[in-house]
């Protein structure tokens, strides 16, 4: 701290990154995958792959709800879309507490309206929840841990920018086959390439967990399980048999009005003369409003009465949110990608992958820099082991989560829990393996395992699917083949990493490593 | 004087604690001050407080590590924090 400003910032960058790097990698990886959580969930429920979106989906859902929930107080229909080609229906019975969640839920085929019975899985929602609430920890504690790690990330990012005297020159510099310099260049390139994304996702992530970190700034919430704010006990209403108007023309009207598809239909007091039909747009048209289609929500809404006549156009609440709230809401919307179409979602995903690579290269670089002087010391060995466990181990565990989805029998009780157990048990075992083999051999073993597990996922899917799988893959909007293709690519990337580790060493590297004198039984080759 | 009394590890630990705890308290009171004078509605003021807190906290942490002198790095944030909190207590909490 006495060597000047940049050196001080470099010290801060190193230690803020290292101390939380492993959690950050896990948060970044699972968060990045969460941009496609609906697609992941669909892949993990092969029973749904045959469903194809149709114009009659809403009316098919109404027919189903008339049969199974004629006395419900409200019906909710999530229409099929390019990301989820099935109909999700849920309803609330009279006397039930109305909150954001709850109520029975059925999944329907979007073409026939038949109920589909998909295997029990948490799918992409597990990865999504894990990235900000971890798992099996008290909610506030987990969010605080993730929040603190994110704060370290922000400090690491800003101090990293300050540290680089020539940040854009560094970006265009890649010195290959130079060991430490190559890793440094890779770290800088992955950071700078998506720097606006990294800053946005980190700052907005902090705002999303602000209620935990800045508890003094928010009203205390009631205990979990208690009725949520704005919830109400639904009262029994007198039943009539007023038919629901045909929804297809109403939704076509809404779609034409917004120039985008309808995502959700909510029918309040169905089958009564007081019935209202609310259609919400699939995506947001604005960044500055809060999520949802209710007051202050960001999706467009049209309402119709029991005769199918439009009630009123929703007024955009630009006046309701102050500029400060609008900025805050924009960060939240950006973080969750609520407005994003396919192209932007892919850009977010690729930026997230670059973020993972930035963290991974930074962690590896710490070891490479210190290999000569600190090999054998407890701190160095601990970091080496944690690096392998966090980077390669988590990658393997994610692949095993997908494998477990296909290998655990579809009708096993609590199979969703067993999928998650497979993830954590395998991650734990790989962490133990990383403690035992915490240098180059450890990397080779775990990266090879990741390569095999990921690259064979398409084969596993093929073997587990019923005949006619190709047609169903195509019918699922290409989601399933793209998922399989990405797994194959990921596997090949891990295989390339293994090949890099197994390459013959140059003379200079050999000569340098020959100077490394391990003070324990550890191997002299410390990291990739 | 401090540098003679304490080892480098102790002084660096002091900086870390100052940055994390002192920085949190200082960022908290500064963001509260900014929100107080912003004249915004309660809800907007809360949003402003959150956003300002994280920006200020980052800046304070970096400032603590930017000082060349350990003594200044450790004492300055705490002095500013105490003064800012006292001023808040007198001006806002005790205001009629």
Image: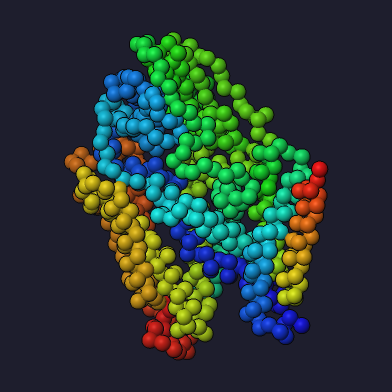
**Residue A397 placed where, x, y %?**
34, 59
Q: A369 or A438: which is nearer to us?
A: A438
The image quadrant that residue B24 belongs to is bottom right
- Give me the residue at 52% from left, 64% from top: A20
Position above or below: A191 against A442: above
Left or right: residue A165 versus residue A179 is right
Q: Is residue B40 left or right of residue A525?
A: right
Q: How many marks?
A: 0
- Quarter holding the C terminus of chain A is bottom left
In this view, the residue in front, A293 or B41, is B41
Q: Residue at the location (50% across, 69% down)?
A: A363
Residue name at image x 69 percent, y 54 percent? B28
Rendered location of residue A256, percent (x, y): 49, 21
* Vertical placement of residue A5 versus A196, above or below: below
Residue A373 location in percent, x, y?
52, 85
Q: Position of residue A321 (x, y in %)?
A: 65, 34
Residue A339 seen: yes
Q: Quadrant of the N terminus of chain A?
A: bottom right
Task: Give the side of residue B1 with respect to residue A513, left or right.
Answer: right
Q: How is the image coloured?
A: rainbow
Q: Is residue B56 visible?
A: no
Residue at the far left: name it.
A467
- Residue at x 68%, y 35% (from the top left corner): A322
- Viewer-nearest residue: A170 or A484: A484
């Amino acid at each position: 701290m006495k060597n000047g400003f940049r050196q001080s910032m470099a010290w801060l960058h190193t230690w803020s990154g290292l101390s939380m790097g492993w959690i950050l990698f896990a948060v970044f990886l699972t968060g990045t995958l969460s941009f496609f959580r609906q697609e992941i969930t669909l892949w993990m429920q092969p029973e749904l792959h045959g469903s194809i979106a149709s114009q009659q989906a809403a009316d098919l859902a109404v027919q189903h709800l008339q049969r199974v929930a004629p006395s419900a107080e409200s019906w909710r229909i999530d229409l099929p879309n390019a990301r989820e080609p099935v109909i999700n229906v849920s309803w609330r019975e009279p006397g039930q507490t109305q909150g954001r969640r709850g109520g029975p839920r059925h999944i329907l085929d979007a073409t026939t309206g038949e109920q589909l019975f998909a295997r029990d899985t948490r799918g992409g929602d597990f990865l999504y929840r894990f990235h900000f609430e971890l798992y099996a920890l008290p909610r506030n504690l987990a969010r605080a841990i993730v929040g603190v790690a994110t704060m370290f990330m922000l400090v690491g990012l800003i101090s990293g920018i300050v540290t680089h005297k020539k940040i854009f020159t560094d970006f265009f510099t890649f010195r290959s086959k130079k060991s430490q310099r190559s890793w440094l260049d890779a770290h800088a390139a992955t950071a700078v390439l998506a720097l606006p994304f990294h800053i946005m996702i980190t700052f907005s992530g902090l705002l999303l967990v602000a209620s935990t970190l800045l508890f003094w700034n928010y009203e205390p919430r009631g205990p979990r399980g208690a009725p949520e704010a704005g919830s109400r006990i639904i009262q029994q209403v007198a039943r009539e048999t007023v038919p629901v108007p045909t929804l297809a023309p109403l939704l076509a009207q809404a779609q034409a009005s917004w120039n985008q598809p309808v995502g959700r239909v909510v029918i309040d007091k169905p089958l009564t003369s007081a019935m209202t039909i609310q259609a919400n747009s699939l995506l947001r048209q604005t960044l500055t409003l809060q999520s949802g289609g209710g007051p202050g929500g960001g999706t467009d809404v049209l309402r119709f009465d029991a005769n199918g006549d439009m009630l009123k156009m929703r007024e955009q609440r630009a006046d309701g949110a102050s500029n400060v709230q609008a900025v805050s809401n924009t960060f939240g919307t950006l973080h969750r990608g609520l407005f994003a179409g396919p192209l932007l979602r892919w850009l977010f995903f690729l930026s997230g992958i670059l973020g993972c690579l930035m963290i991974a290269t930074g962690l590896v670089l710490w070891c490479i820099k210190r290999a000569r002087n600190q090999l054998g010391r407890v701190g160095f060995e601990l970091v080496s082991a944690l690096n392998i466990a966090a980077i390669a181990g988590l990658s393997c565990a994610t692949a095993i989560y997908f494998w477990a989805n296909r290998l655990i029998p579809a009708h096993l009780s609590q199979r969703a829990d067993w999928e998650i157990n497979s993830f954590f048990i395998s991650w734990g075992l790989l962490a133990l393996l990383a403690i035992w083999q915490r240098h180059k051999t450890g990397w080779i073993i775990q990266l090879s395992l990741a390569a095999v597990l990921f690259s064979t996922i398409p084969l596993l899917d093929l073997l587990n699917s019923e005949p006619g799988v190709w047609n169903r893959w195509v019918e699922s909007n290409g989601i399933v083949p793209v998922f399989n293709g990405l797994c194959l690519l990921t596997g090949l990337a891990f295989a390339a990493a293994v090949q890099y580790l197994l390459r013959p060493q140059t003379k200079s590297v050999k000569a340098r490593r020959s100077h490394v004198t391990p003070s324990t039984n550890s191997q002299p080759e410390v990291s990739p | 004087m401090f540098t003679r009394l304490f080892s480098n590890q102790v002084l660096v630990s002091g900086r870390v604690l100052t940055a994390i705890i002192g920085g949190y308290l200082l960022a908290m009171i500064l963001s509260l001050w900014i929100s107080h004078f912003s004249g915004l509605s309660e809800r907007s003021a809360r949003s402003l407080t959150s956003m300002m807190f994280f920006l200020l906290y980052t800046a304070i942490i970096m400032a603590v590590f930017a000082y060349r002198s350990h003594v200044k790095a450790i004492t300055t944030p705490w002095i500013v924090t105490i003064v800012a909190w006292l001023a808040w207590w007198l001006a806002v909490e005790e205001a009629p």
